Image (cartoon, coloured by chain):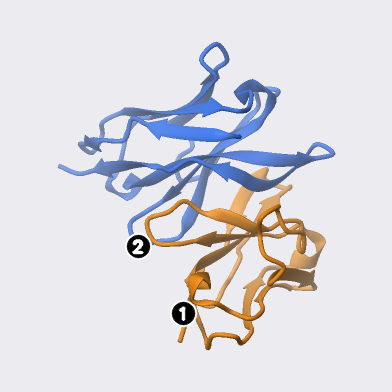
Chain colours: A blue, B orange
Amino acid sequence: EVQLVESGGDLVQPGGSLRLSCAASGLIVSSNYMSWVRQAPGKGLEWVSVIYSGGSTYYADSVKGRFTISRDNSKNTLYLQMNSLRAEDTAVYYCATVGIVAGIPESFQHWGQGTLVTVSS
Amino acid sequence: SYVLTQPPSVSVAPGQTARITCGGNNIGSKSVHWYQQKPGQAPVLVVYDDSDRPSGIPERFSGSNSGNTATLTISRVEAGDEADYYCQVWDSTSDHYVFGTGTKVTVL
């Protein structure tokens, strides 16, 4: 059974930094496409970033240049380093696996329970 | 950037059929996926690749996709189907993932 457990969410001041972690079991992070999706309070889902098994990374325009996705193969863990945080980054952050068919990204198959990031002074 | 538009809300009586639309430019050429999200919970995939269901999802959930509109259909609606529903596609031109605006389904 696949399990994804996020951690690292906290209250941080604008301009600050935070690193989120997503510990995985039941799958090998480095062999999968892994993504972060966020949801601001009372709002819809917003894709944030993805890292492919080959190491390529992509970011939503709203976070590009401020956020960095990475993974630690030895810990089977996905990370999201968030710098220069803004109030509008306040959200629950979910990590999720991305299904692949013939090398084409598909749906978000497995989700963690989420971790809350609050950016406020 | 690619945009997916959903109606904010859909209301349906128990036992009836709910249809949730997802509009996007030539969305019929893309694979569309649908998620159910209940309050305080993570999203759950209910339909992938336009019309396939993951294991454990009832046959009452079905999907279609053509032209500029994809549709999630929930037949014989139950109280437990009350939730927010989101469509999603992968935009190959930007390698970005796009979610629809979300639809709140209310069971009357």
Q: Residue A35 vs residue A20: left or right?
A: right
Where residue B39 appears, as percent x and y from the top left, is: 39, 61
Q: Residue A22 vs residue A28: left or right?
A: left
Where residue A65 appears, as percent x and y from the top left, is: 46, 32
Q: Which of A19/A112 is in front?
A: A112
Image position of A105 with respect to A17: above or below: below
Helix, strand or loop status at disc 2: loop
Residue at the disc numbered 2 = A42
Residue at the disc numbered 1 = B106
Residue positioned 61% across, 87% down in the render: B16
Image position of B75 with respect to B80: above or below: below
Image position of B33 with respect to A82: above or below: below
Q: Quadrant of the N terminus of chain B?
A: bottom right
Identity, as a three-letter code, of the amino acid under mark 2: Gly
The residue carrying pointer 2 sits among few (fewer than 14), some (14 to 19) or many (20 or more) residues within 10 Å by Cα, namely few
Q: Nearer the viewer, mark 2 or mark 1?
A: 1
Identity, as a three-letter code, of the amino acid under mark 1: Thr
Circle number at residue B63:
none
Res B89 → quadrant: bottom right
* Residue A92 appears in the figure: yes
Image position of A28 with respect to A89: above or below: above
Chain bearing tag 2 is A
